Image: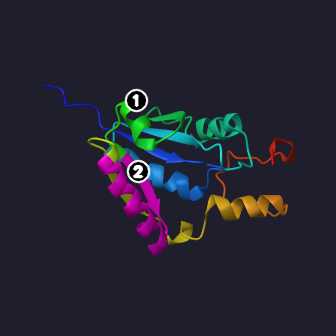
């Protein structure tokens, strides 16, 4: 009897995707049959880059890995997991504050969503200082981002929407 596919969702704004995100996905890939990079669309949160731009970047970064799928969603992550038949969520942890926040979300997700387990991967030290929020500030200040972004990401100032 074939085992059910192990599908994981890695949700995020990926505004923009960072080397830290890429590391988490690459470390998660051996654990799952498929990893869905799911760009969450939050109407309250103002993005620096369009949804289309962020999805293009994700597709470019993972172009050589057929196990990585790019998607997007609105609403609750666990509802998206049910829609795509994913039983796992992937979350990267950079520090204790991330853990406290993600632990609470994970516990709420087990109440709201059936059969969704969260897999936490701790950031490698060389990526623990990188966050999309900080990278956005560097971009807005026209600073160099090569140390933080995958090589496939080229920032075109015209692509900034805010």
Identified at 82% across, 59% down, the residue is 140
Question: On screen, 137 above or below 35?
Answer: below
How crowded is the residue under tag 2: few (<14 C-alpha within 10 Å), some, or many (20+)?
Answer: many
How crowded is the residue under tag 1: few (<14 C-alpha within 10 Å), some, or many (20+)?
Answer: few
The image shows residue 161 at horizontal and vertical percentages of 80, 44
Identified at 60% across, 48% down, the residue is 13
The image shows residue 72 at horizontal and vertical percentages of 55, 35
Callouts 1 and 2 close, C-beta under 8 Å: no
Is residue 84 left or right of 111 when viewed as pictured? Answer: right
Would you name the residue on which mark 2 appears?
90
Q: Is residue 41 shown in magenta?
A: no
SS of the residue at dot 2?
strand
- Residue 75 in view in this figure: yes
The image shows residue 73 at horizontal and vertical percentages of 53, 35
Would you name the residue on which mark 1 appears?
83
Residue 105 placement: quadrant:
bottom left
- 46, 28: nearer the viewer: 46
Identified at 34% across, 45% down, the residue is 112
Question: On screen, 128 above or below 11?
Answer: below
Q: Which residue lies furthest to the left in this view?
A: 1
- Residue 146 in view in this figure: no
Which of the two labelled residues, at mark 1 and mark 2, occupies the earlier sequence position?
Answer: 1
- What segment carries the magenta color? 89-111
Gap in Å between the C-alphas at discs 1 and 2? 16 Å
The image shows residue 151 at horizontal and vertical percentages of 67, 50
SS of the residue at dot 1?
helix
- 11, 154: nearer the viewer: 11
Q: Residue furthest bottom?
A: 96
- 112, 116: nearer the viewer: 112
- For residue 124, the mark is none
Q: Is residue 104 shown in magenta?
A: yes
């Amino acid at each position: 009897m074939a085992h059910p596919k192990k599908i994981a969702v890695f949700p995020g704004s990926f505004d923009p995707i960072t080397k830290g995100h890429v590391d988490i996905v690459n470390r998660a890939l051996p654990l799952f049959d498929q990893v869905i990079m799911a760009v969450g669309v939050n109407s309250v949160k103002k993005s620096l880059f369009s949804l289309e731009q962020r999805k293009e970047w994700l597709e470019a970064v993972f172009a050589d890995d057929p196990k990585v799928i790019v998607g997007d969603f609105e609403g609750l992550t666990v509802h998206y997991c049910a829609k795509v038949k994913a039983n796992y969520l992937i979350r990267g942890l950079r520090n204790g504050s991330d853990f406290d926040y993600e632990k609470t979300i994970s516990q709420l997700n087990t109440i709201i969503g059936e059969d969704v387990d969260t897999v936490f991967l701790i950031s490698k030290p060389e990526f623990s200082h990188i966050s999309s929020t900080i990278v956005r500030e560097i971009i807005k200040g026209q600073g160099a981002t090569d140390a933080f972004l995958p090589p496939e990401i080229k920032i075109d100032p015209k692509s900034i929407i805010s």
